[in-house]
C-alpha cells in the first residue's frame, strides 16, 4: 500500500484539506480512577474513540452507546452529550504549525465551543450537536463542504 500524501506546511494542509462528520452520536464521559477492562473493551470498535488519564481522572470520548455502558459501571461519572466528531482527512506532518489555531480561531470567532483530539497524523474536533450548523458553515468557508 502506498502511504498517503502528507502536508508539511499550513499552506499545503489548507490547500488539500477535506473534512467529514462522523455519522454516530458521541459523548464525553469523565470519572475518578482508572478505567476498568470493560471500559477499554468499549474502545475496540471501528469508530473513533479517545481516552485520557490525568490527575486521577479518566476521560473517554466515544460513541454515545458505549458511554452509556461506561456510565453504568461508573455511576458517579459525568457526561457531556450529544457531541459531533469532526475528522480532518488530510494527513499532516508534525512540523505543520498553526492548523488547529486556524480552525479553532475561526470557530471561536463564530462562538462555537469545542474540544480537540489529535491522532498521530490527523486532527479531530468534537462539539455540541447544537453547534453543528455553525461549525459546518465556518469549516465550509475554510475547506469546502464536508465529505460524505
Image: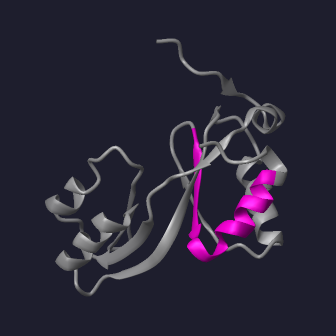
Whether residue 104 is visible to the viewer of this picture, yes or no, is yes
Answer with left or right where residue 57 lies relative to residue 127.
left
Q: Where is 111 relative to 1, above or below?
A: below
- Give the residues drawn in magenta, as a range: 122-140
Q: Where is residue 96 in the image (x, y as percent from the top left)?
A: 72, 37
> In the picture shown, does residue 49 fall above or below 53?
above
| Vertical relation: 19 (above or below) 78 | above
| Magenta stretch: dominant secondary structure | helix
The number of discs equals 0
Residue 112 in the image, given as x and y percentages of width and height: 71, 72
**Residue drawn at the location 84% of the way across and 35% of the way down:** 11
What residue is rendered at 15% in x and 61% in y?
38
Residue 73 counted in the magenta span: no
Which of 102 and 80 lies nearest the eye of the viewer? Answer: 80
Name of the residue lying farthest toward the bottom: 76
Q: Nearer the viewer, residue 49 or 34?
A: 49
Residue 133 lies in quadrant: bottom right
Amino acid at each position: 500500500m502506498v502511504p498517503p500524501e502528507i502536508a508539511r506546511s499550513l499552506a499545503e494542509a489548507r490547500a488539500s484539506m477535506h473534512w467529514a462528520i462522523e455519522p454516530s452520536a458521541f459523548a464525553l464521559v469523565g470519572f475518578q480512577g482508572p478505567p476498568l477492562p470493560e471500559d477499554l473493551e468499549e474502545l475496540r470498535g471501528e469508530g473513533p474513540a479517545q481516552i485520557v488519564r490525568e490527575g486521577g481522572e479518566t476521560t473517554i470520548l466515544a460513541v454515545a452507546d458505549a458511554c452509556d455502558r461506561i456510565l453504568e459501571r461508573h455511576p458517579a461519572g459525568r457526561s457531556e452529550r450529544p457531541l459531533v466528531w469532526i475528522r480532518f482527512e488530510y494527513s499532516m506532518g508534525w512540523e505543520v504549525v498553526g492548523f488547529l489555531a486556524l480552525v479553532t480561531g475561526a470557530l471561536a470567532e463564530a462562538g462555537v465551543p469545542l474540544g480537540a483530539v489529535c491522532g498521530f497524523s490527523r486532527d479531530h474536533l468534537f462539539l455540541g450537536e447544537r453547534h453543528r450548523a455553525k461549525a459546518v458553515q465556518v469549516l465550509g468557508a475554510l475547506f469546502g463542504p464536508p465529505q460524505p
